[in-house]
Image (cartoon, rainbow, N blue to C red):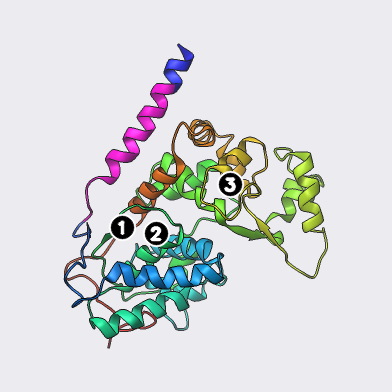
């Protein structure tokens, strides 16, 4: 009976995820730009630019994932994170280490030459991110660009690494994303990094105890301490997935079950009753992470999108049209 119930739970999660991404939001649709950019293949153009960058810099994968996430969680997926200027989203503390802007600029410049004023910066972000993670999910396009970008909005809306699972679920739910989507989207950490400054308290003085976080594997703590000395002038980087850090796969979830989650929010996913089952199913392969992650990216990419006559198609991704 227990095995049957577990299998039923897996089917329920999979069905829920598939059903909730089926309808398009607003005017978003697959193939929106077909025939709209003269003879230029919009998605093919972006793909070639991403492929060229990936060939010499594989860190572009987590960079674009983070860029897309940080854009969508602030005023929706409207490319407002790309706008330059004092007090814009770029200047907010959570966004100071975001990168990948130059790749989006490169794609925008090339597409503007082919069909001026047609392809939005917001859609370029979504397409480029899909191509970077080398998954085959179909990107829905038709977004338009926003014209408001405030650092205060970014600081208020972007969830931090110190959250527990319940807090993360609440933050994602506020954007229309379920607990299952929270687990899937945090799976982007399978190719991400953090820095020692964000985890040092877990390694040396968790909650003021003077000891490491008891929920971490002691051997893992010892390994991370070598990378992150208690006092250091250098803020070293740390892979968030120590299994296969350059591959989008389910290794991240296996690490969580082994108590090798680097960030508190990651490790807590494996311990919270609302997310533990999904983590186990993804780790075991009962749920296919690559395909469901693609679905989750489509879902996230539809957050508060501007379509139709809303917003604008920016001439430059870095500035609002005048």
Residue 126 vs residue 162, the one in the foreground: 126
Residue 130 is labelled as 2
Q: Main secondary structure of the magenta part?
A: helix
Location of residue 110 by image quarter: bottom left
Vertical position of residue 274 compared to residue 301: above or below = above
Read off the residue under disc 3. Answer: 265
Q: Pointer 1 and pointer 2: residues touching (CB < 8 Å)?
A: yes
Nearer-N-terminus badge (1/3): 1
Q: Gap between marks 1 and 2, in whole Å?
A: 7 Å
Q: Position of residue 317 (x, y in %)?
A: 36, 79
Disc 1: which residue: 139
58 relative position to 209: left or right: left
Q: Is there any visible trace of residue 73 in the rendered image?
A: no
Q: Which residues are magenta?
A: 7-25
Q: Quadrant of the N terminus?
A: top left
Q: Is residue 74 left or right of residue 142?
A: right
Task: Give the residue furthest to the bottom.
Answer: 322
**Mark pair 3, 2: CA separation:** 24 Å
Taking the spot 45% from the left edge, 21% from the top edge, the residue there is 6
Q: Is residue 223 visible?
A: yes
């Amino acid at each position: 009976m227990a095995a049957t119930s577990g299998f039923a739970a897996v089917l329920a999660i999979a069905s829920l995820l598939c059903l909730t991404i089926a309808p398009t939001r607003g005017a978003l649709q697959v193939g929106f730009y077909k025939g709209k950019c003269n003879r230029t293949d919009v998605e093919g153009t972006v793909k070639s630019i991403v492929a060229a960058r990936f060939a010499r810099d594989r860190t572009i994968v987590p960079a674009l994932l983070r860029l897309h996430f940080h854009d969508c969680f602030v005023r929706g997926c409207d490319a407002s994170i790309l706008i330059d200027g004092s007090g814009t989203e770029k200047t907010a503390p959570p966004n100071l280490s975001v990168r990948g802007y130059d790749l989006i600029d490169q794609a925008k410049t090339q597409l503007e030459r082919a069909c001026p004023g047609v392809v939005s910066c917001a859609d370029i972000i979504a397409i480029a991110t899909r191509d970077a993670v080398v998954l085959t999910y179909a990107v829905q396009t038709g977004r338009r660009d926003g014209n408001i970008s405030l650092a205060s909005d970014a600081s208020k809306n972007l969830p931090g690494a110190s959250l527990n699972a319940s807090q993360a679920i609440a933050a994602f739910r506020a954007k229309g994303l379920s607990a299952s989507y929270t687990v899937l989207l945090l799976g982007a950490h399978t190719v991400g990094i953090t820095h020692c400054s964000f985890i040092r308290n877990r390694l040396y003085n968790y909650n003021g105890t003077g000891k490491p976080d008891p929920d971490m594997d002691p051997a893992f703590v010892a390994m991370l301490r070598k990378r992150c000395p208690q006092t250091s002038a250098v803020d070293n980087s740390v892979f968030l997935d120590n299994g296969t850090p350059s591959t989008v796969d389910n290794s991240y979830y296996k690490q969580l079950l082994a108590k090798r989650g680097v960030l508190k929010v990651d490790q807590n996913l494996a311990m919270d009753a609302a997310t533990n089952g999904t983590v186990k199913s993804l780790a075991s392969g009962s749920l296919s992470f690559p395909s469901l992650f693609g679905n989750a990216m489509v879902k996230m990419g539809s957050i508060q999108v501007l379509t139709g006559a809303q917003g604008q198609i920016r001439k430059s991704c870095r500035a609002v049209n005048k």
